[in-house]
Amino acid sequence: MAPRRAPSGGPRRQHRLLRLVLRLDQAGSAAFIVVALAAAPLLGLLAAFPAARWALGVLFIGYAVALAALGVCMAYGLSRSMCRGEDLPAGMWVSLLMFRPAEGDTSPRRPRPPPR
């Protein structure tokens, strides 16, 4: 059996779905924290209404399941890239972490030594 060739189009095209899933997971996790913090006082106000509390709980569970599905898609995309032997570009991780290296710094992984 002949080895499979990597699809053409460069790394940006190859990892388009993985980049989308990583961004959605990051945004969804941040929104989940904000919604959870906003819902905490709301739960106190809804203490007298068990049906409303139940509905809010179902919404939170649905949101958590959606985030878990994104995590599964992310793990699948990363493992698929690893099995193919592909190298994920460093710029992809830097853009997802919202970390911008200083000008002239070619290695975002190593911190700069302090000035003397």
Image (cartoon, rainbow, N blue to C red):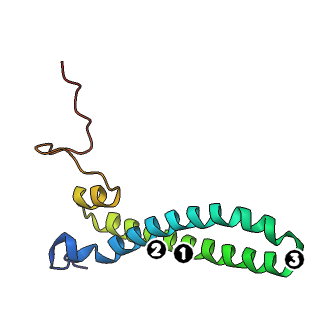
Which of the 4 image quadrants contains residue 110?
A: top left
What is the CA distance from the residue labelled 2 to the residue labelled 3?
A: 35 Å
Q: For numbered disc 3, what is the local secondary structure? A: helix
Q: Relative to residue 21, is residue 41 drawn left or right?
A: right
Give yes or no for contact between labels 1 and 2 (Cβ–Cβ under 8 Å). Answer: yes
Residue 48 horizontal/vertical position (percent): 89, 73
Residue 93 horizontal/vertical position (percent): 30, 57
What is the CA distance from the residue labelled 1 to the residue labelled 3?
A: 29 Å
- Which sits earlier in the primary sequence, circle 2 or circle 3? 3
**Three-letter residue code for mark 1:** Ala
- Which sits earlier in the primary sequence, circle 1 or circle 3? 3
**Three-letter residue code for mark 3:** Pro
Question: Residue at 19% across / 79% down in the picture?
Answer: 7
**Three-letter residue code for mark 2:** Cys
Which residue is denoted by mark 1 in the rendering?
A: 69
Label 1 CA crowd tier, 10 Å (few <14, some 14–19, many 20+):
some
Label 2 CA crowd tier, 10 Å (few <14, some 14–19, many 20+):
some
Circle on res. 73: 2
* Residue 1 vertical placement versus 115 (above, below): below
Which residue is denoted by mark 3 in the rendering?
A: 50
